[in-house]
Amino acid sequence: MLRTNTCGELNLTHIGNKVTLAGWVQKTRNKGFMIWVDLRDRYGVTQIIFDEERTDKVMLEKAQSLGREFVIQVQGTVIERVSKNPNLSTGDVEILAESFDVLNPSKTPPFTIESETDGGEELRMQYRYLDIRRKPVRENLIFRSKVSLAIRNYLSAHNFIDVETPYLIKSTPEGARDFVVPSRMNAGEFYALPQSPQTFKQLLMVGGMDQYFQIVKCFRDEDLRADRQPEFTQIDCEMTFVEQEDILTRFEGLLKHLLKEIKGVEVFEFPRMTYVEAIQKYGNDKPDIRFGMEFAELNEFAKGKGFPVFDQQELIVGIAVPGAASYTRKQIDKLIDWVKRPQIGANGLIWVKCNEDGSYKSSVDKFYSQEDLTNWAKQTQASAGDLVLIMAGETNKTRGQLSALRMELAEQLGLRDPETFAPLWVVDFPLLEWDKESKRYHAMHHPFTAPKPEQMSLLATDPGAVNANAYDLVLNGNEIGGGSIRIHDAKVQETMFDLLGFTKEEAQAQFGFLMEAFQYGAPPHGGIALGLDRLVSILGGQETIRDFIAFPKNNRGRDLMIDAPASIDSTQLEELNLVLKQKK
Ligand code: ASP
């Protein structure tokens, strides 16, 4: 080894020890007759001291030329520091250098390699290996490794087997575009990179593997909304001979295990909410339930009172904002401007202040009596001191807008505490979704999801009304996982493809292998996949998944470090049969 100790472990118990450390020069302070060097490695920072009096003059001179990020090896003695640094685990000691070697010099880094850096996001991505030397990034990667290990431990302890599935496959539809790979040996044909290992994990169940998991890369060619990556990691799982409830219990257990192991937090409550309820109460299917502000529908209490704006609308819906009755006109106007921005697109807000004396003041006092306002307050569960905010319009749109406002207010009011964890299951999703543009059904989860058994007959008569045995795991307003009980009957699978607009031939060409497998004793099975990147970032108390990925891509899908994607030369294109061969 090039070292006896790491830069993170020496303390007062090591005083007098002769040690060898190796690492990067984070910082030097040069007083001429004395030089201090902060030496860094993955484990921490240790101060090295070069001193004219106590050590060698020649060495001191040599040390003058040490620059930031030089890699050095130092021999010396551990001594007690005169001025201690309580912020460092090694802050009580320093190493009195006796000799050192420069193992490799460094160019001056393009940004400072410290916890607080002056480097912009793009620059740090370009030099990601330097960014990884910074403590926050390094700690995030170590944190991710810990979470992965805890996941493996839990799943292994419950009999899940880690099986690798191929990356060069045929399309598995999860609702995004495929990344395709041209095949050199099969002219004109292409592999698709998996959007998920969905069909393979089902085939593993047909193969009798019983319980499978894999921490696996998936690839989806989507227009990148903020904080999405074209390749991302899933904890992909499948179980045989289970019902929905078995899966919920097992994976509720996984999340509880992680929260306890990683955060030291015990979560007891794990509510279940139907899709319909989530949409009605929170305006979206991944509600943040760390705080209240549940929706109250006010049609019954607000229509027919001569206020034309409300009378014309499909839905009138409100929330009570805790403690916000004291908002000034200006503060309320700001909220109104916020919902009118094109990103939200609302027409405005109606407000009611619930005064401490039990009276109400609203923006529609002309049309509504105190009794009406009392009803609204009651419905939204507003108390004295709260502010009721109301929106009206087309049902789905209005729910979406109020949901956005609810989240914004929670943010402003500090109700989205990253150290509070509020998981829940959203269940009973519709099986199909009608797409107005293509005038056909889409699978809400994916085409392999089973209808509720008791609704099977509805498939033929009213497919849009059928619910699925599908579920999402939601944590703090994020969907962190989703899955379903699968179809395991070839006939039902055929019907499903038919409903989704596949011709028999298309279904056969794309998924013949699966329907065939279902004819060889496919057991009932179901599963789930959790997004590891998102899960880790929530557990880590941060918003962006990029911070927890070693080599992320930017929001144009580019890797700025290796500069990918890139063009390939004409010979390669020819080999891949992507262009006609040039006559030589
Ligand atoms: N394959 C699904 C997905 O990637 C998850 C599942 O149904 O297990 O979302």
Image (cartoon, grey):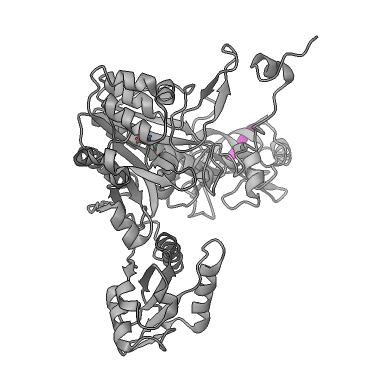
Magenta stretch: dominant secondary structure:
strand
The quarter of the rendering in which ligand 1 is drawn is top left
User: Which is nearer the eye, 99 or 256?
Assistant: 256
Q: How many marks?
A: 0
Q: Where's residue 541, x and y in %?
A: 43, 52
The magenta span reads 96-101
Q: Where's residue 348, x and y in %?
A: 49, 73
Residue at x 37%, y 31% (from the top left corner): 497
Residue at the limit of the structure toward the top, as seen here? 584
Question: Looking at the picture, does residue 526 appear above or below residue 351?
Answer: above
Q: Is residue 365 visible?
A: yes
User: Which is nearer the eye, 194 or 440?
Assistant: 440
Residue at x 20%, y 29% (from the top left corner): 241
In the image, 189: left or right of 374? right
In the image, 390: left or right of 27? left
Q: Is residue 236 visible?
A: no
Q: Where's residue 478, x and y in %?
A: 40, 51
Residue at x 33%, y 87% (from the top left corner): 356
Specify the quadrant that holds the C terminus.
top right
Question: Looking at the picture, does residue 463 appear above or below residue 166?
Answer: below
Residue at the limit of the structure toward the front, as seen here? 461
User: Which is nearer the eye, 579 or 307?
Assistant: 307
Asked if residue 100 is among those painted magenta in the image, a careful observer would answer yes
Q: Where's residue 188, x and y in %?
A: 59, 17
Residue at the limit of the structure toward the right, as seen here? 584
Residue at x 30%, y 77% (from the top left corner): 301
User: Which is nearer the eye, 322 or 352?
Assistant: 352
Asked if residue 498 is among those painted magenta in the image, a careful observer would answer no
